[in-house]
Amino acid sequence: MTKTASIVFCAFGEDSYMNRLAQSTVPVRLGLQEYDRSVLLEHELNIGKFSVPSWDRNAATVFDVPTADNLILHLNELARDDYQTDLFIMTHGYNNRFRVSNGTYGDNAVLTDREIISRVSPAAGKFRAVWQCNCYGSTLNDSWLQLVFQVAAGSRFVNFYPTRWSGFAKT
């Protein structure tokens, strides 16, 4: 029987109260449900009376910090353990790279296309789809496809926040 997994990677890392509040309302649980294993890589945010909704964390079998090392670790582990994996990325993007955390919210770094290729083990038939809600995500499509993802989707230019996530994830 085929085992399925998802990784939802959220690392906006912004100082703005309003941006953090808006980001904490994105229903990331939609990318975690109905999988045999699900990994949520997102900071636990406390925003006044608000925080990362517990239903998002509860939908994940693994909850961890959105660092490059954690993303690569989980991609490699899921492939090694024969999971067919979908990856959903919600972060800021630039040409050939996207934002990751250094471990603390607001302490940011980037993960480049070259690092993706050199650190993630190609997994034919195990990586299914990568959906990127990061500006210039299309500049990373070839890197994901080189790792044998069956499909990679990323915006050509500026992507306007994950407002379309709910409709996409529900279909």
Image (cartoon, rainbow, N blue to C red):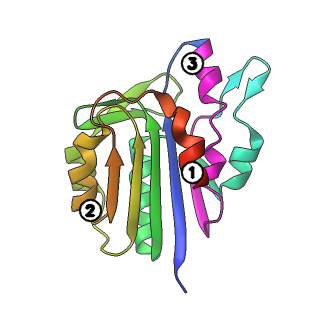
- Amino acid carrying mark 3 in the image: Asn
* Rendered-image quadrant of the C terminus: bottom right
Q: Which residue is mark 3?
A: 19
Q: Nearer the viewer, residue 161 or 24?
A: 161
In the displayed structure image, the side of residue 24 where residue 156 appears, left or right: left
Q: Nearer the viewer, residue 17 or 120?
A: 17
Whether residue 65 appears in this view of the structure is no
Q: Are marks 2 and 3 in contact (CB under 8 Å)?
A: no
Q: Residue at x 32, y 33 (%)?
A: 110
Range drawn in magenta: 18-43
Q: Secondary structure at mark 2?
A: loop
Mark 3 or mark 2, which is nearer the start of the sequence? 3
Mark 2 or mark 1, which is nearer the start of the sequence? 2
Nearer the observer: mark 1 or 3; the answer is 1
Where is residue 144 drawn, in percent x and y?
28, 55
- Amino acid carrying mark 2 in the image: Leu
Mark 3 or mark 1, which is nearer the start of the sequence? 3
Where is residue 148 drawn, in percent x and y?
27, 66
Report how far apart the C-alphas of labels 1 and 2 lie in the structure. 23 Å
Whether residue 43 appears in this view of the structure is yes
Report how far apart the C-alphas of labels 1 and 3 lie in the structure. 21 Å
Q: Nearer the viewer, residue 73 or 13?
A: 13
Q: Which residue is mark 2?
A: 147
In the displayed structure image, the side of residue 100 where residue 15 appears, left or right: right
Q: Is residue 25 magenta?
A: yes
In the displayed structure image, the side of residue 90 where residue 42 appears, left or right: right
